């Protein structure tokens, strides 16, 4: 996803699946807690339908529309967490697994001595 796009400009845009079939309209954009970058979009899939969460990476904004590289059926079957609320890390993990996206483990700390314990100064 292009990261130079203001997430507010995504709201109201049309979204299409990998075959070019229309999914719906973007209702909300969710930002990553750590980076502040747009991470998920909630797409209204029909007049009386619920919103479906889709990953903005690896989606593409092409000529003002969002193209999501997944089938419409997979998108419509995404876990439903409701919109207008914060996504918890567990909910995000469920979405990543639903879409088969790799979620790497958190980076490990460097393997070195962080300092001396109090009272253990060398003389």
Image: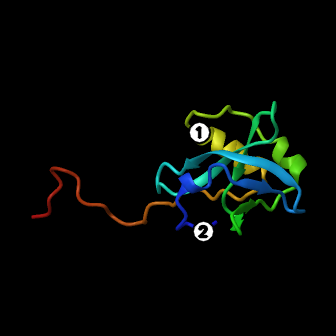
Toward the viewer: 75 or 16?
16
Q: Which mark is residue 13?
A: none
Task: Point out the tag, 1 or 2, that comes first from the N-terminus.
Answer: 2
> Residue 117 at x, y = what percent?
23, 52
Toward the viewer: 103 or 76?
76
Residue that numbered label 1 is attached to: 87
Q: Could you tell whether 37 is left or right of 111 in the image?
A: right
Give the mark toward the camera: 1 or 2. Answer: 2
Toward the viewer: 29 or 47?
47
Toward the viewer: 83 or 110?
83
Which residue occupies 62% across, 55% down? 10
Which residue occupies 53% across, 51% down? 32
Please identify the quadrant where the N terminus is shown: bottom right
Which residue occupies 74% across, 54% down? 14
> Residue 20 at x, y = what percent?
87, 62
Q: Could you tell whether 80 is left or right of 71 in the image?
A: left
- Quarter-wise, where is residue 123 in the image? bottom left
Disc tally is 2
Residue farthest left in this picture:
123
Compared with 73, 88 (above or below) is above
Which residue occupies 52% across, 59% down? 6
> Residue 102 at x, y = what percent?
71, 59
Q: Residues within 10 Å of mark 2 (few under 14, many from 20)?
A: few
Q: Could you tell whether 103 is left or right of 107 in the image?
A: right
Q: What separation in Å lies between label 1 and label 2 (alpha carbons)?
A: 22 Å
Secondary structure at numbered mark 1: loop
> Residue 36 at x, y = what percent?
47, 54
Residue that numbered label 2 is attached to: 2
Q: Residues within 10 Å of mark 1 (few under 14, many from 20)?
A: some
Secondary structure at numbered mark 2: loop
């Amino acid at each position: 996803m292009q990261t130079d796009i203001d997430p507010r400009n995504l709201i109201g845009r049309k979204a299409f699946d990998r075959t070019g079939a229309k999914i719906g309209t973007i209702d909300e954009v969710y930002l990553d807690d750590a980076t502040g970058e747009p991470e998920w979009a909630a797409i209204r899939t029909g007049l009386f339908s619920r919103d479906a969460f889709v990953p903005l990476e690896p989606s593409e904004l092409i000529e003002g529309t969002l193209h999501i590289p997944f089938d419409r059926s997979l998108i419509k079957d995404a876990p439903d967490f409701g919109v207008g609320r914060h996504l918890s890390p567990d909910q995000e993990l469920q979405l990543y697994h639903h879409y088969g996206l790799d979620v790497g483990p958190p980076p490990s700390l460097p393997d070195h001595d962080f300092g001396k314990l109090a009272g253990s100064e060398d003389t």
